Image (cartoon, rainbow, N blue to C red):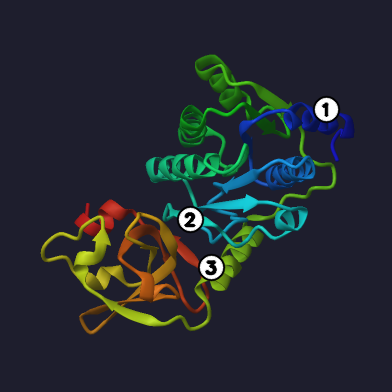
Amino acid sequence: MAGDMPYNRLRERISGLSGVVMVIGSADTGKTTMARMLMDDAVAAGRTVAYVDADIAASTVGPPACVGLRFVASIPDVETLSQPDELRFVGSVEPHGVVLPHVVAVAALVDVARSRADLVVVDTTGVVSGVVGQTLKYHIAELTKPAVVVALSRGNELDPVVGMLRRFLSTPVAEAGPPDDLFPSSPVERQMERAAAFHRYLGDDPARWRVQTTVFAPTLPVGFDVSRLDGMLVGVQDEQGRCLGLGVLEHDDGAVRVATRHGEEMRGLRLGSIRVDLETFATTGVRLRELIFGV
């Protein structure tokens, strides 16, 4: 690892903290590796731990396009994080255009996590620069009030975010570099990994459930052309506002169906901002306002 001593000092510093530890960094800087280390340390010390995975592009807990929560009670739990205890739907694999639902999803699951765990580790998306990256990190920190932010950077790419967190929120920040043996994935590799993740969670031939146009959020306007929903990713919701899992809409001869594993428990569908091809599981971005209103 890049500097064993800095990592050891950082882990020792965090071992005595309670509350939220937020891990930030661009893609492939070892955020999830760091989160696992911190959870290993906490579980080994007999602490109650929760992991909130807010990396909607490269999810560890649950499917892409969602924020996932996993309670961790043992070392084996740290190695098998994929099954979520709770999900919140964001509807995109990029934060552009979904900053509000992304921040709300993280804050909601951190609140749930705090009810049962004395340490909550929040892993974040790799978008760290520009208005979107800075705004997202700022508001997540503002609402979750981390005891410390762990910032993993290769150079100075996190300087604007770190400076903003320190200046406006007085957030303690511990800075470190990524592991020496970590090699960044290419954009094509990331796309392939994301398609494989959607495939795992949606399945090869999920059941189809016919749905009415009244079940959607946002509400569809009168006269809406339902053929435009074909291929849209949706969050399958229960009556408590929780996301049960994902679905993909299909349109056939005026009828709308959702392909999902969660049809029996479904109470409503939240429209996402991407289309998913159920043969290749490739995704394309969609502007939700344009989809619904044509503008």
What is the spatial separation of the Cα atoms under label 2 and label 3, in whole angstroms? 15 Å
* 18 on left or right of 248: right
In the displayed structure, 207 sits above or below 11; it is below
Of circles 2 and 3, the one toward us is: 2
Q: Nearer the viewer, residue 291 or 37?
A: 37
In the picture of the structure, the residue carrying the numbered disc 3 is: 198
* 117 on left or right of 265: right
The numbered disc on residue 9 is 1
Which residue is painted at 51% across and 36% down in the image?
133
On the image, the x and y values in percent for residue 195 come to 56, 67
On the image, the x and y values in percent for residue 137 come to 52, 33
What is the spatial separation of the Cα atoms under label 1 and label 2, in whole angstroms? 33 Å
In the picture of the structure, the residue carrying the numbered disc 2 is: 87
On the image, the x and y values in percent for residue 278 come to 46, 76
Residue 249 placement: quadrant? bottom left
Q: Earlier in the sequence, mark 2 or mark 3?
A: 2
* Number of other residues with Cα within 10 Å of mark 2, as a class: few under 14, some 14 to 19, many 20 or more: many
What is the spatial separation of the Cα atoms under label 1 and label 3, in whole angstroms? 38 Å
The quarter of the image holding the N terminus is top right
